[in-house]
Image: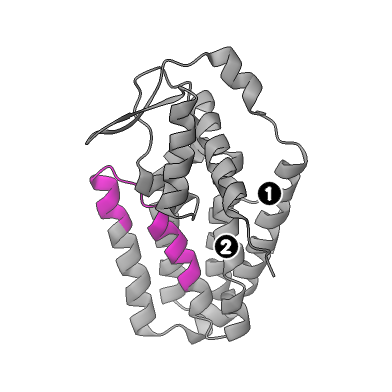
Amino acid sequence: MLEPVSRDTLTRQVVETIKRFILQEDLPPGAQLPSERELSEALTVSRNIVREALSALVAQGIVVKQAGRGNFVGDYDQKQLMTSVPLVLGERSQSLITFQEARAALEVGAVGLIVQRITPEEINHLQALIDLQKQRYRDKKSAIKEDIDFHLTLLKVTHNHVIEEMSPLVIEVFRRTLIEEPSSLRANPERIIHEHTAILNAIRKRDVEATRMALITHLRVPGFRA
């Protein structure tokens, strides 16, 4: 099972993620950062952890808080920021790939049970999550929570309690991905919606092979084959 992460470690991870996001996106002073809600959902940490991280960045002059408006990039020294956070994380990057492979093996391996056991009500629930993703995209809001819920639901519909207990792995992959690749905060929502729809359409047809291939395409794990 996954080991719990300490509060201090989570706060440091959020601090590092925001720094990397600013650098990777080349955000200028005055640019608005993702909301506390978006960061909390994407990194699967509490809003309090996000606030602690933002407060630390405010103290460093990297972030400026504006009451009622949100958080913005401060007038920071880019060279100093670049030296304060590694852009290539070496062993941790390899760790991310390892987690992505394990997550893909879990979800793809469960496809037979998903297709066999999913109920009409559960199919409707997956469709509702996709519809909510579409609405949040139209509203220009983050749909990362709905993305996570879609994949957690895929495991839940197996009706296998052991597989369900492995669901923290899915959450951990989302969190680690954002830490390693903060620019994925701006991942193409249209692509995700399209691929979730393809997965659900294959499930509706009770087509195990089509569901498996749609899921592999969506997860995009280098070198992974079913």
Q: Amino acid at mark 1?
A: Leu
Q: Which residue is mark 2?
A: 170
Q: Is residue 127 above or below residue 47?
A: below
Q: Which residues are magenta?
A: 133-153
Task: Judge whether residue 14 is colored magenta.
Answer: no
Q: Is residue 143 above or below residue 78?
A: below
Q: Which residue is mark 1?
A: 96
Q: Percent x, y for residue 217?
A: 56, 54
Residue depicted at 59% across the width and 48% down the height: 8
Q: Percent x, y for residue 32?
A: 34, 29
What separation in Å lies between label 1 and label 2 (alpha carbons)? 12 Å
Q: Amino acid at mark 2?
A: Val
The answer to whether any part of residue 19 appears in the image is: yes
Query: Going from the N terminus, do you reach mark 1 or mark 2 first?
Result: 1
Crowdedness near tag 1: few (<14), some (14–19) or many (≥20) residues, C-alpha within 10 Å: some
Question: Would residue 197 appear left or right of 164 to someone viewing this image?
Answer: left
Q: Predominant secondary structure in magenta? A: helix
